Image (spheres, rainbow, N blue to C red):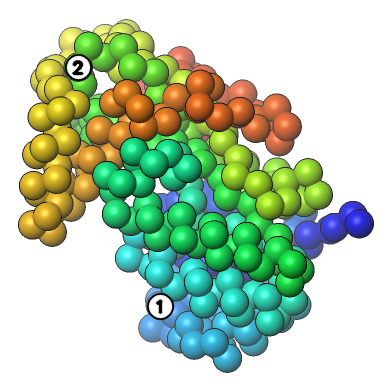
């Protein structure tokens, strides 16, 4: 039976990834977009966007989701535990599609999920979604790899465009798949425009796949400067990251993300470990050269 998704509500629309998803949905002109917001939130949105307040209780979530065809979650790490109740409320409200806040690394990879505990929450969320299929709720999880353009502002994938510093892991030749914020939004829009083709699937997308050495060469070419390079091994980063994370320091988590992105065996090269859905979703082409050029020029991608 052919599904049509028209009414979409976004949870976490004010976050870094949420803003990109919200913008893509609105600018596609294909959906009636609304936002789920906490009562205390002061975030504002474009004129005409309906903001539904919820304290995340079951009753308020069911009321918020009634009449919605799809719920898109862009909740951050601290909010992932709320997705279970949102899934249950979606079933009771008659929602057709739930897109969890999967955006990132390959959580189907056991090495990655064992290293970063929060990934276990995402795995349990997907398992819960699978259990709802017989109740009429379909789902799509989208793995994007780390967010390149956003991450380059803070060194997330080993590069900081503001300080022109790079941390190269091992020999710098491990390929990793990564997406720009706009491509994450493109993927969500495409999934909702093709509900039958994307139902109950874990999908891999990217903007490009490259090695750190390839990225560094392009950054130095575009900036016209040699970057300050620090070399680190994946093993030392893993040990340091685990020690810091055990102390509750966010820097430890960032190091562990670097490990699963740039280390072998963590599923970060989507071409090798999963079938890219870019063509199936008709995503626009984004590559390393054009991405770096836009970043250096201070332009959006």
**65 or 170, which lies in front?**
170
Q: Position of residue 244 (x, y in %)?
A: 9, 49
Q: Residues within 10 Å of mark 2 (few under 14, many from 20)?
A: some
Secondary element type, mark 1: loop
Q: Find the distance from the CA under tag 2 to the CA under tag 1.
A: 43 Å
Q: Position of residue 163 (x, y in %)?
A: 17, 29
Residue drawn at the location 15% of the way across and 52% of the way down: 245
Residue drawn at the location 44% of the way across and 45% of the way down: 107
Examine the rendered structure and indicate whether residue 12 appears above or below residue 265. below
Q: Is residue 64 left or right of residue 106?
A: right
Residue drawn at the location 46% of the way across and 55% of the way down: 123
What residue does disc 2 label?
170
Q: Position of residue 214 (x, y in %)?
A: 35, 11
Examine the rendered structure and indicate whether residue 73 appears above or below residue 287. below
Q: How many marks?
A: 2
**23 or 127, which lies in front?**
127
Q: Quadrant of residue 151?
A: top left
Q: Position of residue 83 (x, y in %)?
A: 49, 69
Residue 41 shows which numbered tag? 1
Q: Please say whether residue 291 is visible from this viewpoint.
A: no
Q: Which of marks 1 and 2 precedes in the sequence?
A: 1
Residue positioned most to the bottom:
59
User: Comparing marks 2 and 1, which lies closer to the viewer?
Assistant: 2
Examine the rendered structure and indicate whether residue 65 appears above or below residue 274. below
Q: Quadrant of the N terminus?
A: bottom right
Secondary element type, mark 2: loop
Examine the rendered structure and indicate whether residue 293 appears above or below residue 33. above
Q: Residues within 10 Å of mark 1 (few under 14, many from 20)?
A: few
**4 or 296, which lies in front?**
4
Q: Is residue 149 left or right of residue 129?
A: left
Q: Please say whether residue 120 is visible from this viewpoint.
A: yes
Residue drawn at the location 70% of the way across and 63% of the way down: 133
């Amino acid at each position: 039976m052919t599904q049509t998704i028209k009414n979409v509500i976004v949870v976490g629309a004010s976050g870094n990834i949420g803003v990109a998803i919200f913008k893509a949905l609105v600018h596609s002109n294909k959906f009636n977009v609304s936002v789920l917001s906490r009562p205390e939130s002061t975030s504002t949105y474009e004129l005409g966007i309906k903001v539904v307040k919820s304290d995340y209780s079951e009753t308020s979530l069911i009321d918020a989701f009634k009449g919605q065809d799809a719920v898109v979650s862009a909740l951050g790490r601290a909010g992932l535990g709320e997705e279970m109740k949102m899934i249950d409320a979606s079933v009771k409200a008659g929602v057709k599609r739930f897109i969890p806040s999967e955006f990132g690394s390959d959580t189907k990879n056991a090495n990655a999920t064992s290293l970063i505990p929060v990934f276990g929450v995402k795995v349990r969320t997907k398992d819960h979604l699978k259990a709802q299929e017989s109740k009429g709720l379909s789902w799509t999880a989208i793995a994007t790899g780390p967010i390149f353009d956003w991450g380059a502002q803070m060194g997330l994938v080993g590069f900081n465009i503001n300080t022109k510093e790079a941390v190269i892991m091992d020999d710098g030749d491990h390929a990793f798949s990564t997406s720009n914020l706009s491509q994450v939004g493109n993927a969500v829009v495409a999934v909702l425009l093709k509900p039958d083709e994307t139902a109950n699937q874990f999908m891999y997308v990217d903007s490009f796949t490259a090695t750190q050495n390839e990225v560094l060469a392009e950054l130095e070419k575009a900036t016209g400067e040699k970057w300050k390079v620090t070399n680190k091994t994946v093993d030392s980063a893993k040990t340091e990251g685990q020690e810091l994370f055990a102390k509750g320091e966010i820097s430890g988590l960032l190091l562990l993300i670097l490990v699963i992105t740039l280390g072998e065996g963590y599923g970060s090269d989507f071409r090798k470990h999963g079938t890219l859905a870019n063509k199936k979703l008709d995503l626009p082409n984004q590559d390393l050269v054009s991405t770096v050029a836009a970043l250096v020029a201070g332009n959006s991608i």
